[in-house]
Image: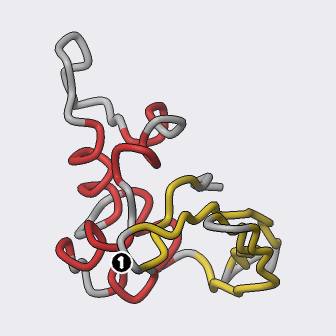
C-alpha cells in the first residue's frame, strides 16, 4: 500500500485497500473544506483522492513522516499490522495498527487511522 501511495498508483491502491470499508471511520479525515457534504458522497473515491497526488493523507504519511512496520498478528483470515509514523522533524512517533482481511487470494487493508 505504501509503495502505491508513494507513486500515486490508484490501480494498485484500489487492489490492495478496501476503500469503502476503510473510509467508513475516516470520513472526517477525507473531507476538505471545498467539498459539498450535503449530497451523498462516494467515500471510497474521496479516500483514494486523499491517498494520491496532493492528498492530505499521502502528504502526511509520505512527506512528513518515516514509516516503520512492526509486528503482525494473524487470526484466520484477518490480521493486524503495527505501523509507526516517525515525524521527520520532531522525531515524535505515532503508533497505529492497520487491519487486513484475506480476500480473493490476497490481503486487503480494511481499516486504519490517518494518525
- Residue on which the image places disc 1: 5
Please name the residue shown 54% across and 36% down the image.
25
Q: Quadrant of the C terminus?
A: bottom right
Find numbered disc 1 in the image and state the secondary structure of the residue it sits on: helix
State whether residue 25 is above or below residue 61: above
Please name the residue shown 74% across and 63% down the image.
96
Judge from the rendering whether residue 110 lies leftward or rightward of residue 46; answer left or right. right
Judge from the rendering whether residue 74 lies leftward or rightward of residue 64; answer left or right. right
Residue 16 image point, x, y percent: 37, 73
Residue 90 image point, x, y percent: 78, 75
Judge from the rendering whether residue 51 lies leftward or rightward of residue 112; answer left or right. left
State whether residue 20 is above or below residue 76: above
Of 66 and 106, nearer the camera is 106
Of 76 and 19, nearer the camera is 76
Tell me the quarter of the picture where residue 23 sits. Answer: top left
**Badge 1 local density, few (<14 within 10 Å), some, or many (20+)?**
many
Tell me the quarter of the picture where residue 3 sits. Answer: bottom left
Amino acid at each position: 500500500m505504501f509503495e502505491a501511495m508513494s507513486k500515486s498508483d490508484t490501480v494498485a491502491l484500489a487492489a490492495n485497500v478496501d476503500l469503502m470499508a476503510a473510509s467508513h471511520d475516516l470520513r472526517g479525515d477525507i473531507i476538505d473544506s471545498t467539498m459539498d457534504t450535503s449530497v451523498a458522497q462516494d467515500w471510497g473515491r474521496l479516500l483514494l483522492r486523499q491517498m494520491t497526488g496532493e492528498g492530505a493523507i499521502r502528504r502526511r504519511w509520505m512527506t512528513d513522516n518515516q514509516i516503520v512496520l512492526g509486528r503482525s498478528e494473524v487470526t484466520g483470515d484477518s490480521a493486524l499490522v503495527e505501523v509507526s509514523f516517525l515525524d521527520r522533524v520532531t522525531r515524535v512517533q505515532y503508533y497505529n495498527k492497520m487491519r487486513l482481511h484475506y480476500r480473493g487470494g490476497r490481503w486487503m487493508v480494511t481499516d486504519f487511522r490517518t494518525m
